[in-house]
Amino acid sequence: MNSYFDYNATTPISPAARDAWREAAEHFWHNPSSLYREAGAAKRRLEDAREALADRLGTEPERVVFTSGATEGNNAVMAHAARRQAAAPVVISAIEHPSVREAAFREFGKECVTELSVTPRGAVDLDLLAAQLENGDAPALVSVMGANNETGVIQPWREMAVLCRKHDVPYHCDASQWIGKYPMAGLGESCDFLTGCAHKFGGPKGVGFLLIPEDAITDFHSLVGGPQESGHRAGTEDLPGILGMIAALETHQDAALAEARVGRLADRTAFESALVERVPGTCIIVSEVDRLWNTVMFVVPEHPNLKWLTRLANAGFAVSTGSACSAGRGNPSRVMEAMGLDYEEMGRVIRVSGGWETTRADWMALAAAIEGVSTDLSSGSRQSGVDLGA
Ligand code: PLP
């Protein structure tokens, strides 16, 4: 039984990625920038990987920059936009990952960052973006994610990309939670900048990628130093990591993703129905909205979420609070706040996120375990549990 339900935080490495990583670590460990034969072989594999990724994204390999993950990519995109247009504002959504938001604050200054609010359904309001682009000062960049990591709500990235293009404003999409779960076709064409990280889709940790637009090819840089990645990102490339990432992606072909999603959605719906039936008073957050097929966020009827997490952990289940705090600990989740939850409710939020290998039986076992915790808590049991932190 698979009782890991925190795939939005990270995924286990897939067998294909592990094999590709190991093979490269054993046979292609040479520095791709060196000039002897073995280095040339490593360089060829690096460029093949770039082509394979560009192909999946429907774009040119020159736009692909390999990075250490989405945090680096998001920081680099903000820094680039600020270098280009320091005096212009930047537009992000109120539910961006901290690696977008904090980077925007640092590069532009808080007063120059417009945070688009989301509707109570958890998606960015397109009308607000349209109004901003029509009436406000032209921003240096619009950055809105593909899907939210806490609620799973799919954002209207295609429509936003079209709007931005109409106004000649670069659009950046943090697609960390999209890639590996949904088809990638169209992303490269629609988005000027795009970031992703391998460990969210079965690849190794500490590796990711960034797409830059053609007009940034001459002046874009993430890290400065050596001339690697055509001068866009200095530092010896992690070839085993990159080949592991591409192997993980190859196990998620677009057609199969589109087809398999239907069954996975049915499994998730079965879980949600079982949950609200078995634990009366539980509320699924934005249940009717288009969300990632693997993600459910819900508010339990009573007791702080950490009590539930501790007991679930003792029963062998790994779930998360998202970044929602429990009452009195940590900061409230900005995502929940943006969607209008009150502080007390935020302390009762639980996020579960499954993977491709999660079966309906796994989801049902989780529902049964949550019911068990509910009974346990209602009976006032004082199980000590493990300390999970905030
Ligand atoms: N963006 C989103 C939407 C994420 O969910 C995450 C990871 O939680 C990141 C960015 C950062 O990814 P990494 O820690 O791999 O750099």
Image: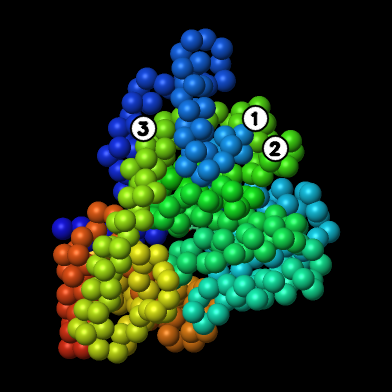
Q: Nearer the viewer, mark 1 or mark 3?
A: 1
| Residue density around tag 3, few if under 14, some if 14–19, many if 20 or more, within 10 Å | many
- Of pointers 3 and 2, the one earlier in the residue sequence: 3
Q: Which mark is residue 217?
A: 2
| Residue density around tag 1, few if under 14, some if 14–19, many if 20 or more, within 10 Å | some
Is residue 286 left or right of 281 when viewed as pictured? right
Is residue 313 left or right of 156 when viewed as pictured? left
Gap between marks 3 and 2, in whole Å? 29 Å
Gap between marks 1 and 3, in whole Å? 23 Å
* C-beta proximity under 8 Å, tags 1 and 2: yes
The residue sitting at 51% across, 15% down in the picture is 40
Q: Most extreme residue toward the right, as rendered?
A: 87
Locate residue 89: give its quadrant: bottom right
Q: Secondary structure at mark 1?
A: helix
The x and y percentages for residue 244 are: 39, 36
- Front-most of residues 355 and 58: 58
Q: Amino acid at mark 3?
A: Trp
- Front-most of residues 213 and 109: 213
Whether 12 is drawn above or below 60: the answer is below
Q: Amino acid at mark 1?
A: Ser
Residue under label 1? 230
Q: Nearer the viewer, mark 3 or mark 2?
A: 2
Gap between marks 1 and 2, in whole Å? 9 Å
Is residue 2 left or right of 305 when viewed as pictured? left
Q: Nearer the viewer, mark 1 or mark 2?
A: 2
Whether 178 is drawn above or below 295: the answer is above
* Quadrant of the image containing the N terminus: bottom left
